[in-house]
Amino acid sequence: MLVMNRTLDETVPPLPAGVRPPERLDLPGGVSLHRRAPAHAGPMNAAVTRNLEHLRPWMPWAGSAPTMEESREIAQSGWQAWADGTDFLYVAGLEGEPDVIVGAFGLHGRIGPGALEIGYWVDFDHTGRGIATQAAAALTTAALELPGIHRVEIRCDESNAASAAVPRRLDYRLDRIQQDAPITAPSETGRKLIWVKEA
């Protein structure tokens, strides 16, 4: 394991045209991931607002509730990033409850060529049900099946035990610890765990 004291260049080229992950992934227990769309702005706004206290320790954007206009702009930019091949955002929903979002997930093209990073959060009332682990497993498989992608990473602060449990359960390898990661949320320590799964 390497202890890292540098920041990573996050300027990466987009995936080639036509190379995209699936827009829907079905998980056990009636949960599914769907490509985040502009129509999700309202439900995402409600989900984030409902979970602010839960998310604030770890998410730099969770300092205050987003306005609906901000949620619409985020939804639109996420839709465009998918089309551009640079970022792939999903919402998690329950069967039969199309307007209820129980989590948000992403495959992010920000860690260098040939790799994608998985990000996630789960609604407080739905934690402990394996949703994050199941979704990360499905996203890992989807990412490594994309032409040109040979590595998937999950990154989290050293003190975020719940987040770190996901790559451990999925047999990711703890590749390195970034010692000087920027502290962007209240509970972060500046020591970032970087977990890796390779094709």
Image (cartoon, rainbow, N blue to C red):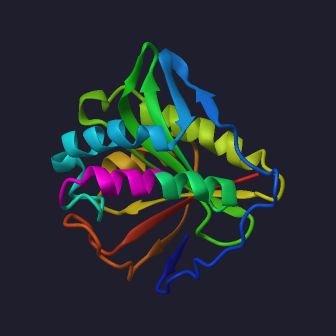
Which of the 4 image quadrants contains residue 137? top right
Residue 112 place in picture, x, y as percent: 66, 72
Q: Residue at x 50, y 83 (%)?
A: 7
Q: How many marks?
A: 0
Asked if residue 44 is among those painted magenta in the image, a careful observer would answer: no
User: Extreme front residue here?
Assistant: 69
The answer to whether residue 60 is above or below residue 79 is below
Q: What stretch is highlighted in magenta?
A: 64-75
Image quarter of residue 175: bottom right
Q: Does the stretch in magenta take in 68? A: yes
- Asked whether residue 122 is in view, the answer is no
The residue lying at 81 percent from left, 61 percent from top is 16
**Quarter of the rendering containing residue 149:** bottom right
Q: Is residue 59 shown left or right of residue 196?
A: left
Of residues 74 and 188, which is closer to you in this image? 74
Q: Residue 36 location in percent, x, y?
A: 51, 42
Q: Is residue 112 above or below residue 123?
A: below
Where does the image place residue 45, in percent across and percent down from the top left? 29, 44
Q: Which of 42 and 93 is in front in this view?
A: 42
Determine whether 45 is above or below 85 in the image.
above
User: Picture coordinates of residue 83 (x, y %)?
Assistant: 67, 54
Predominant SS along the magenta part: helix
Q: In the shown orientation, is residue 178 left or right of residue 142?
A: left
Q: Residue at x 36, y 72 (%)?
A: 191
* Left or right of residue 181: residue 37: right
